[in-house]
Image: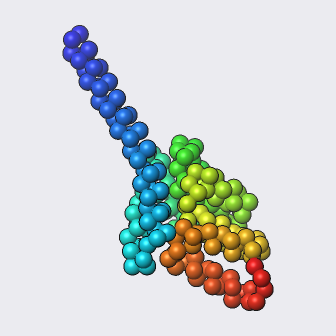
Amino acid sequence: MKRVVNFFKYTFVTLALYCASGASIAQTMPSKLTQLYQDLRQSAPENAPKIEAEIRFLWTSSGSHTVDLLVKRGQDALDRGETALAAEHFSAAIELGPRYTGAYILRARAYVLAGVLGPAVHDLQTALRLDENQFDAIALLGQVFERLGDLDLAQRSYEQALAIHPHFAQVKEAQAALRAVVGDQAL
């Protein structure tokens, strides 16, 4: 009986420490991201890739192995062009980890590739409610607005993404392409 009590005591202590460290990590990550976003805004072009890589690394952390596995399966399906299957995996990941922005953005990407833009916009808005500085979500929103023909909102999205990540090459290219299409028209 004493062994059983000791086992539960040690299990409880281990669980308490694990939960406490998880809370600490969860509280540290947003402040770390906030600092990295600030650093990225002010970075020289040669320093931006390193800061961006740190941000992207933090973005990949869902905090759940199951969510990570579902996201990986969704990404694999997306790579194979199976957008419906990818969206299903991302939806399952969202059910298990509703505060994980990465799953919303990836599901939005699957929706965009499938031509389902309304739900894509909804997912991107949700991702931005969770992390207003998520420059990938803002950039993808710009692409969606372009597809919808709202070039003004597309331009504003690209400007917003560049305000957070001034050296975001893909957004600079998209913005230049948009300006080339629009020409002298005021956006």
Which quarter of the figure has residue 11? top left
Residue depicted at 69% across the width and 60% down the height:
121
62 or 135, which is in the foreground? 135
Which quarter of the figure has residue 33? bottom left
The residue positioned farthest toward the front in the image shown: 42
The answer to whether 176 appears left or right of 169 in the picture is right
Query: Is residue 40 depicted above or below 94 in this figure?
Result: below
130 or 89, which is in the foreground? 130
The residue positioned farthest toward the left in the image shown: 3
The answer to whether 78 appears left or right of 18 in the picture is right
> Does any portion of residue 7 appear in the rendered image?
yes
Q: How is the image coloured?
A: rainbow
Residue depicted at 44% across the width and 66% down the height:
39
Residue 126 spot, x, y in % from top left: 64, 52
Residue 42 spot, x, y in % from top left: 46, 70
Residue 17 spot, x, y in % from top left: 32, 32
Residue 115 spot, x, y in % from top left: 70, 67
Residue depicted at 55% across the width and 61% down the height:
134
The answer to whether 87 appears left or right of 100 in the picture is right
What quarter of the picture does the C terminus occupy?
bottom right
The answer to whether 112 appears left or right of 79 in the picture is right
> Does any portion of residue 61 appear in the rendered image?
no
Q: How many marks?
A: 0
Residue depicted at 49% across the width and 69% down the height:
41
